[in-house]
Image (cartoon, rainbow, N blue to C red):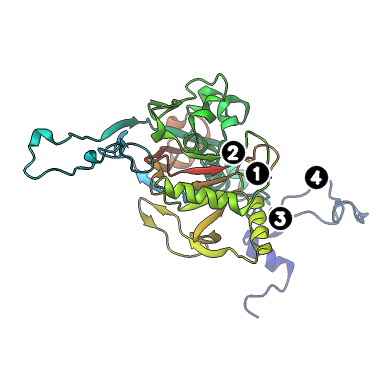
Amino acid sequence: MAGYFKTIEDLERATYGASGNDQLLKATTGIHSIHDGAQTLGNQGLYNLVYGQKVWSMINREINALSMLPKKPWNASGWRILKGRSVGGNNDTFSVSDLDTLGGQAENATISSITEVQPTYEILHVSPKTIAHTYEVSEIAQLMGGLDDGIGDILAAYREEVGVSHAESLNKMILQDLTSVAGTGVDAHATKADKALLSLYRIVSTHAEMNALGTLTNKLKLYGQTRASSGTEYLEAYVDSNSGTDRNLTVNLLNTALRNLMARGGEPKVILTGYDTIQSLGELLQAQERFMGRAEVVPSHNGIKGVKGREIGFKVATYHDIPIIPVKDMPNGGAGLSDMLILDTDHLFLCTMKPTEYFEAGMHTGEVFGHGKLGHRGIYRTIAETMCTYFRGQGKIIDLV
């Protein structure tokens, strides 16, 4: 019957080609235990393990934070922000000390009697960051991978794996908490942090929070400005913390954060948090006979959304119609529940000068002298930086348990 294997030889030919079982990799001893220590076969050479070309990942490779951050082209290295109204001050609410400043005028008033007003602007700027990962495969390894019971096309396998790791690294960079940025965590020395993409935690922060980081160089610097206790309120995000002491997650904490962010002019578009916090929030709502909704989220690049489907879109829980995205690398302060980042992604995005590109050279491509070795090298490179154009609309809830 067509499509079925009648013999072991048929299976080998379908899997490894017509050369048959003489191409299978022989085990070194010829004897292997069944199921890690169960009954052992007694005769040498009775059978050999066959591994196959498929490599199964035992690692969670999710990169939801990176996927959900909008991507925009790098059109400029600086931008202007409005930090004070022409009338009404620079607070969240419109306030005046004298009604005359609102513009009411007497009949036939002289122009010179009208109060002159003007808005206040600030200039921010940033430099692009280069993130790169490379790998190398010798010519012998490349050739041997296609023989015996090898991995097959080892270049393709490395190309796929390093590409995923490159994306995971970008995802991890934008989720580095302030402790790591300050110098006690992964890739956290000031010089290394300056080479990495700017973390969302450094953007979604306050002067008080950053000032408490000790001796970190330029800890108060953000996009060319210096956070201060007064005068730079436009750089202050909303932070709900408990001075490093964990407290219970409540629905009221989340509701208060959303209310305050909207009062500050933000429009929360997404909530990033860990799987543990999503579970706890769901249990809280269920106990109150309230339930999270569901929505399909489709990441976009330069304003272009991917098509719906398993490869692009994915369904997530929602709260007040705001998608709650599970993130495996979400910080948790060391012991408690994962933090919650509440983001207005209309004003927070990854600006890309060069989107992720792949280059390769070596024996495989005929560029022997360019590579300089009897082998092959590939590299993934991204040039980008995290940017924010409205800080007061971004928020986070930390110190949860």
Which of the two residues, 6 or 204, is positioned nearer the viewer here?
204
Residues under numbered marks 3 and 1 in contact, where contact means CB atoms less than 8 Å apart: no
In the rendered image, which quarter contains the N terminus? bottom right
Which of the two residues, 151 or 181, is positioned nearer the viewer here?
181
Q: CA distance from mark 2 to mark 4?
A: 58 Å
> Given the image, on which type of amino acid does mark 2 rest?
Ser
Give the side of residue 1 with respect to residue 325, left or right. right
Q: Earlier in the sequence, mark 1 or mark 2?
A: 2
Q: Which residue is mark 3?
A: 22
Camera sees residue 19: no
Identify the residue at image location x=74%, y=55%: 50
Q: Which residue is mark 1?
A: 400
Q: Position of residue 198 (x, y in %)?
A: 47, 34
Q: Nearer the viewer, mark 2 or mark 3?
A: 2
Under circle 4, the secondary element is loop
Q: CA distance from mark 1 to mark 2?
A: 9 Å
Identify the residue at image location x=34%, y=30%: 125
Under circle 3, the secondary element is helix
Q: Which residue is mark 4?
A: 28
Q: Nearer the viewer, mark 4 or mark 1?
A: 1
Q: Quadrant of residue 384?
A: top left
Q: Position of residue 86 (x, y in %)?
A: 25, 37
> Given the image, on which type of amino acid does mark 4 rest?
Thr
Identify the residue at image location x=14%, y=43%: 105
Q: CA distance from mark 2 to mark 3?
A: 65 Å
Q: Earlier in the sequence, mark 4 or mark 3?
A: 3
